[in-house]
Amino acid sequence: MSGNNYASPIESILHEGRVFAPSEEFRARALMNDPAEYERLWRESIEEPDAFWSRVASELHWFQPWQKTLEWDCPWVKWFSGGQLNLSYNCLDRHVASARRNKAAIIWEGEPGEIRTFTYQQLLTEVEKFAGVLKRLGVQKGDRVAIYMGMAPELPIAMLACARIGAPHSVIFGGFSASALVDRIHDCQATLVITQDGSFRKGTEVKLFPVVEEALKACPAVQSVVVLRRTGTPIEMQAGRDYWWHELMATAKPGTRAEPLESEHPLFILYTSGSTGKPKGVLHTTGGYSVGTYLTTKWVFDLKEDDIYWCTADIGWVTGHSYILYGPLQCGATVLMYEGAPNHPQLDRFWDIIERHRVNILYTAPTAIRTFIKWGDEHPNAHDLSSLRLLGTVGEPINPEAWMWYREVIGKNRCPIVDTWWQTETGHMMLAPVPGVVPTKPGSATRPMPGVLAEIVDKDGNVVPDGQGGFLVIRRPWPGMLRTIYGDPQRYVEQYWSQIPGSYFTGDGAHRDKDGYFWIMGRVDDVINVSGHRLSTMEVESALVSHPAVAEAAVVGRPDEVKGQGIVAFVSLNHEHREAGMLPGLKEELRKWVSKEIGSLARPDEIRFTEILPKTRSGKIMRRLLREIASGGEIKGDVTTLEDFSVLARLKEEE
Ligand code: WTA
């Protein structure tokens, strides 16, 4: 890995002493409420994983039982070998054959205010029909399907239809640009794209089809595009390639059955940022992912049959895959899904939704919580939030102040908070409290979930003493772990299994306290986490360097009160553009350029022109120094490898 500094010790500075046990009322009703029993099960999950996971897996439907629970040849894993199942069957058919048949599976609210409800039976019918449409368009088991949509209910229908016929989907977040789309479609070689004309956000239209159209100029392998009509904006379709969703569905019949799939059959590819420029296609397979998302949803959200559960993530990210769709539907939950922005038409939209739908469980991100704090307590206070009984967070470290605000202002000191640590790669939650048995501490994702053997180690893999910072690693395989990087097994081995041989390297720094609680301290590699979205500094750098005025760029994160991290880009300009660099217009142009190249989520907050970047003698940019400069701090630590010392002084002057 480049640019990082694994040798330097990680200092942990957070000291938080508050502990909150669940209320007696919560505990009494909780699915898991005996700490000794939980302890016993956790131990069993580590010491006898076969027994533990077999029991969990047998709560799901299998067409063919598995022969071997776990085969582990580090770093290659197989879970439930010999077994055959279908995730769409476990999300739908299984419930339709039970008393849940007419229960609401998805309650969807559009940003303009419409509400659509799909019972399990209705959802199954739609999924069966769309699975038939996919087949009619030539999609076969194993073919990859790219999905570039907004938060319409047809998005989960499309995903479940892919899972039903065994066509791995790759959902690409609707905020990505055409060139990001091209990279991903190329990498997974998708032959069909599902999109929509546009989506609603903040009262305006986010155009989606035009982006696909532009991308497809560079993707000749794509044969068909299915377009959902959502905003009604006129679009020009290409005959023989583009089809309206509603026209295809008008003649589609239900009845497409769920294909029995091998446990290790690929389920989806989801692209995420790593410490090099090219996004990684994280591959998840069917059996282990199903079992892992099922168990974690059931235990961590403590689901009750009559709960309304709302995860505010976008399905374009892993949180939406695992905890809007696959985990909750396998549990037979009622999922609320909202299309738009939290500040439309007003700053109280979320609280209004909770009050109107009587939401019981809310799962959101720290960046959203910090934004709500900024908007003011009057917005949640104007609504009746008494239906809430459990709150969750994910995506980045939550600072104790934001945690306390969430507890007091939203949860009225009544609702436990589940801070859940996991990654695109882990597939499901890894560190999280089971709320009836694990007391919580503000800012800690608490303890490892069953089957998760997590440790904090130094660069040689030795466990560090409690309280000391180090690298978070996972020592044992778990069901939902990624199986590889699509098309690049070597990168899978290098990225995750080579830093600390034999252990999964998370890329996060953390420390563990004397009670065995984990405190995540953020990334230790060149990944920045902006509003819970992972971005590689390298991706933003390549986007900048592709602009004709830019010679070289180095991108770092700096702490940001709301977003967690903000993006600062140090840019040196080509000779002929140096003078132009004096023009403030170029900074804005570069920020827009990055939005166009990657998407607005990657737009730098600040651009600093500099003549020269600090490098080591071997030519690596010393991002650590830039990070310190960007956050306005003193330069600490070792600078002996710096090639040219005058650089630091000059960078400071250029501030
Ligand atoms: C960070 C999102 C602290 C972490 C599910 C991780 C967190 C990266 C937490 C994965 C949390 C996620 N506390 N940090 N509860 N949850 N992270 O792949 O740095 O988008 O490595 O998955 O987000 O981000 P990803």
Image: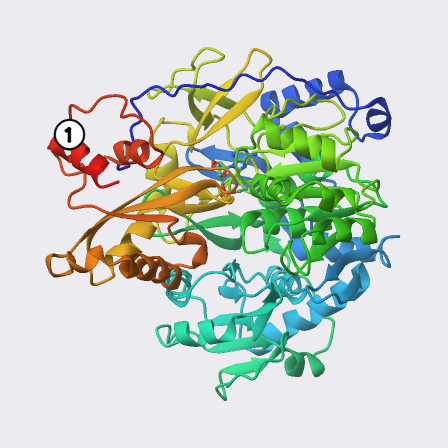
Look at mark 1 in the image and give the residue it sits on: 642
226 relative position to 185: left or right: right
User: Is there any visible trace of residue 427 in the rendered image?
Assistant: yes
Percent of width and height locating residue 45: 63, 25
Classify mark 1: residues with Cα within 10 Å, few (<14), some (14-19) or many (20+): many
x, y percentage for residue 526?
34, 39
Residue 112 coordinates in the image, percent (x, y): 70, 67
The amino acid at mark 1 is Leu
Looking at the image, is 236 positioned above or below residue 645? below
Q: Quadrant of residue 586?
A: bottom left
Vertical placement of residue 246 versus 572, above or below: below
> Image check: 542 left or right of 168?
left
| Quarter assignment of residue 460 | top left
Q: Secondary structure at mark 1?
A: loop
Q: Is residue 611 left or right of residue 44?
A: left
Q: In the image shown, does 110 or 78 lie closer to the viewer? A: 110
* Quadrant assignment for the N terminus: top left
Name the colour scheme.
rainbow
Say whether residue 276 is left or right of residue 601.
left
**Residue toward you, 184 or 539:** 539
What residue is rendered at 67% in x and 32% in y? Answer: 405
**Residue shown at the point (74%, 52%) measured from the top left:** 335
Quarter in which the C terminus is drawn:
top left
Q: Position of residue 200 (x, y in %)?
A: 61, 67
Find the residue positioned furthest to the right: 99
Camera-side residue: 185 or 18?
Answer: 18
The answer to whether any part of residue 334 appears in the image is no
